[in-house]
Amino acid sequence: MAPQKKAGRKVIVTCAVTGSIHTPSMSPHLPVTPDQIAAEAIAAVEAGAAIVHLHARDPETGRPTQDPDLFARFLPRIKQATKAVVNITTGGSATMSVEDRLRPAAHFQPEVASLNMGTMNFGLFPMLERFQDFKHDWERSYLEGSRDLVFKNTFKDIEHILRTCAGNGTRFEFECYDISHLYTLAHFLDRKLVTPPLFVQSVFGILGGIGPHPEDVMHMKRTADRLFGDQYVWSVLGAGRNQMPIATQSLALGGNVRVGLEDNLWAGPGRLATSNAEQVSIVRTLIEGLALEIATPDEARAMLDLKGGDAVNF
């Protein structure tokens, strides 16, 4: 009798398709229009992503936008073409009010929405040293302005977002950019405004947050273990060139991973990623090389206790 294959641990791959961190001029492959965002998300799911994390952009200027009408031009297409878990940002951009940032998640009632767990400096201006030519007038000033810009998410803001979405069955990807954000999440857990399993996305390498050193990753994991025990599902996001090294460390520590062009434009030293699917394929190779398996969307739903793709408003 042939030996039976033992199933490997399931790893949730999230793909952040486009976002407000990188401006359109920095890569010709960054999706901007609704057609491009839909196509990139679908291809990422086909490559192995269980969750797609979605922002929207003005198709004419490339600016980040939280206009629900633009989200409506790609959300149904992704739902019809895939079984993916759709994760809508409540982060948007640091220049937006909390009410503007919340509009798409409140309206479309997704299975998952992202939620930054604190107010912080969010320094994007070092990109000005690496990029000289910009397609749109707003891009250089947007990056320069981050020298004196705070991403605001106070306790009041976070509570407002949680309570607004509470009746919709939307759960959250809690984006934790520093150790203090884990303690903030623990505060809301103690108040029973959030319920396990908590989906904790630890973010490394953003100027203003925790760094990308392996000890930083370990410190984040140890603290989350101490605060949440078996009540959370851990994932990591490494910004820029830190994406794959930090993903690899997470996999070795029993965690999950997030990739995508929102977080990193590259596929290797000096080589731009040509698509989100390319990054998903790279991390899938890492996962399978460690004798692990990628989670399907339905397996991710079970791990995160989600309401199901048929219970959204799109």
Image (cartoon, grey):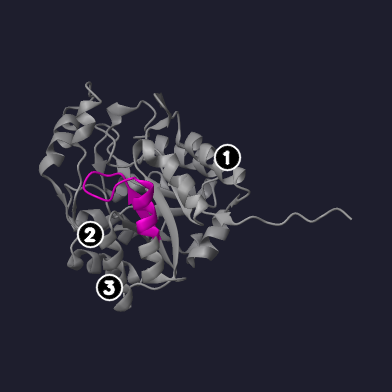
Local packing at callout 1 (Cα closer than 10 Å; few below 14, some 14-19, many 20+) is some
Q: Secondary structure at mark 2?
A: loop
- Residue 100, above or below 42: below
The boundaries of the magenta stretch are 200-221
Determine if residue 113 is in view. Answer: no
Q: Residue at x 34, y 52 (%)?
A: 216
Tell me residue 93's x, y (percent): 23, 47
Label located before the other in sequence (3 or 1): 3
Q: Which residue is mark 1?
A: 285
Name the quarter where the C terminus is drawn: bottom left
Q: Which residue is mark 3?
A: 187
Q: Residue furthest bottom?
A: 191
Q: Amino acid at mark 3?
A: His
| Mark drawn on residue 132 | none
For residue 232, which quarter of the picture? bottom left
Determine if residue 181 is in view. Answer: yes
Q: Which residue is mark 2?
A: 118
The span from disc 2 to disc 1 (Cα, nearest Å) is 34 Å
Magenta region includes residue 203? yes
Q: Residue at x 44, y 41 (%)?
A: 245
Magenta region includes residue 187? no
Label located before the other in sequence (3 or 2): 2
Tell me residue 212's x, y (percent): 33, 45
- Residue 164, above or below 73: below
- Pick the front one: 118 or 6: 6
The span from disc 3 to disc 2 (Cα, nearest Å) is 12 Å
Label located before the other in sequence (2 or 1): 2
